[in-house]
Image: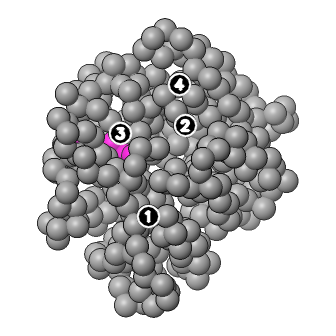
Amino acid sequence: MTRLCAEWEEQEFVQLVFPHKDTDWLEYLDDAIKTFVDIAKTIQRYQKVLIVANDLSYVKSLFANKRNLSFIKLPSNDTWSRDFGGITVEQENKRYILDFKFNAWGKKFEYDKDNQITKKLKLKGLLKNYGHQSINFVLEGGAIESNGSGVLLTTTQCLLEENRNPKLSKKQIEKHLVQYFGLKKVLWLDHGYLAGDDTDSHIDTLARFVSNDTIVYQSCDDKDDEHYEELSKMEMQLKSFRNIDGKAFKLVPLPWIEAKYDQDDRLPATYANFLITNKAVLVPTYKDKNDKKALEIFKKIFPKRDIIDIDCTTLIRQHGSLHCVTMQYPKGV
């Protein structure tokens, strides 16, 4: 029997792929690298971190303390580990990495190097505790949320986008998801988006499982904001969802973030893009008036984990955030 692991289960390590001069981070590369170092140093206090780097010697030099850090030199197009990283399932007391095709969110950007990273990590022995299966199906880690008990949350806008799996209908895509992840139920969100998001509404920017029966979601209380109507409809749909036992989910709204811009471009700031690690939860912050309020909510949700804020004002300039640049690998059984 196959089961898609939940993020709060015990982890072996978290993967980061560092920015370099040939990525879109070039314009503010130093700021981006500083943010990645901040993320890595925070996680390494609690567990292992695997750092993939184009310029290995330089990236190593950024860390005086290398405890819990592993480094490997591999080429990359970009840095979004969540979407080209392996997705881990459990099968009969063994963990398997499902290596789906990555095509840069429907062929929006270059992706040939990123699509090979998981396979190369396996070939180099860095994923030796896991089985590995390459799958001819386009899927990004940020597009799916698991409660660890057979329920998957996703969005129609992303999974039905015409350049991902164009020959498959919604029914066929759901059949594949059920097969790959051993699912009992797929919940499709039809509403919700963030301006400036390149991913066609990845679920990890909108709504996330924090336990088997609890979903946190990005709310909007500003009636004058362009997101108000869609996020209100998303909230109503979340209220209509039922778990496999027929019960409604507990819902926790996250506070709205006032509009952030890079020149004239609206940026997709969201508190839903947090990362759960073994003993801490890293929460993206944006120098916003509601940062403190968001952190207090996470303290209530995760009373046994440290809550640590990560300044993600640079990350959103490339239209992603904290969860997008990380990928956790659950501990081998």
Give the image location of residue 108, x and y in percent.
42, 53
* Secondary element at tag 3: loop
Highlighted magenta segment, given as a residue range = 137-141
Q: Mark 2 points at which residue?
A: 210
Spatial CA distance of label 3 from label 2 is 13 Å
Give the residue furthest to the front. 304
Q: Earlier in the sequence, mark 1 or mark 2?
A: 1
Q: Is residue 104 above or below residue 90?
A: below
Spatial CA distance of label 1 from label 3 is 18 Å
Q: Earlier in the sequence, mark 1 or mark 3?
A: 3
Q: Are marks 4 and 1 in contact (CB under 8 Å)?
A: no
Q: Name the residue under label 1.
A: 47
* Secondary element at tag 2: strand
Give the image location of residue 99, x and y in percent.
24, 49
Q: Mark 3 points at which residue?
A: 5
Give the image location of residue 189, x and y in percent.
52, 25
Numbered circles on residues, count: 4
| Color style of the picture | one colour
Q: Which of marks 4 and 1 is nearer the N terminus?
A: 1
The residue at the point 71 percent across, 33 percent down is 253
The crowd level at tag 3 (other Cα within 10 Å; few <14, some 14-19, many 20+) is: many
